Image: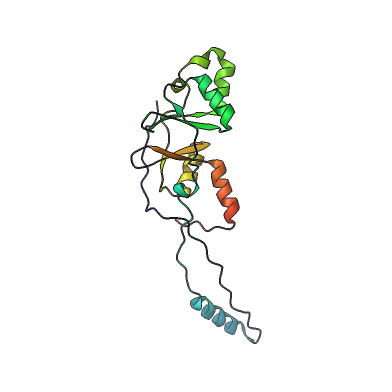
Amino acid sequence: MGRRIETPVSAPSLQIKATAATQAVAKIHSNLKSPSQHAQQAIHDYQEHTEHEPQLVAYATDIMATELKTLSTTATVGDAWLAIKESGYRHLPVIDEHHAIHAIVFDRDIMATLIETPKAIGNNILQHAMHPVYCILENTDIRQTAQILYQHDLGALPVINRQHQLTGIITRTDLLRLLSHYGPMELWA
């Protein structure tokens, strides 16, 4: 059927750090006459420039949505459609009573199911949901998150804690919002 839920390698839990203003650059010395003097001055300016430590951008826990609409494993396709319509969410995780994630439902898949087979409205949601589910831990770097969303053509990734309980969800929109609000960013490996 496909790959099972995999726990990503965990990274140390850190918060978003404010970025510092850029440092002023050295003035252009107009009193230098020869190209060798210009080169020597450039080398001197470069060596005086202090290097800064790479700054972390964000982790899943910093940008995930925690107010979630979920479905139970006993929900029907009709329940899913109503939940999508009422909540306005496009991605609904399917969880059990222990908040363990079993599947995820996308609005486009529910619409396609109901168009193709209207009688499927009473079917159990697990018959039409995507599973296994790609999940990330709360301390997953946003670069990893973006890479998973891109590589697997996903619109959302559920976020789980170390007990494999659903704690949030990150969508492509969340990542775009982060990039648009933070302006120029340096992403470090």
- Looking at the rendering, in which quadrant would you find the C terminus? bottom left
In the displayed image of the protein, which residue is found farthest to the left?
A: 163
Rendering coords of residue 14 (x, y %): 41, 55
16 relative to 183 in the view: left or right = left
Identify the residue shown where x is 46% and y is 41%: 148
Identify the residue shown where x is 47% and y is 44%: 145
Rendering coords of residue 7 (x, y %): 36, 40
In the displayed image of the protein, which residue is found farthest to the right?
A: 30
Using the image, determine if residue 48 lies above or below residue 60.
below
In the displayed image of the protein, which residue is found farthest to the top?
A: 119
How many marks do you count on the picture? 0
Identify the residue shown where x is 59% and y is 27%: 85
164 relative to 25 in the view: left or right = left
Q: State which quadrant residue 74 falls in.
A: top left
Rendering coords of residue 188 (x, y %): 47, 57
Using the image, determine if residue 98 lies above or below residue 177.
above
Using the image, determine if residue 56 lies above or below residue 52.
above
- Looking at the rendering, in which quadrant would you find the N terminus? top left
The scheme the figure's colours follow is rainbow
Q: Who is closer to the viewer here, 141 or 73? A: 73
Q: Who is closer to the viewer here, 18 or 127? A: 18
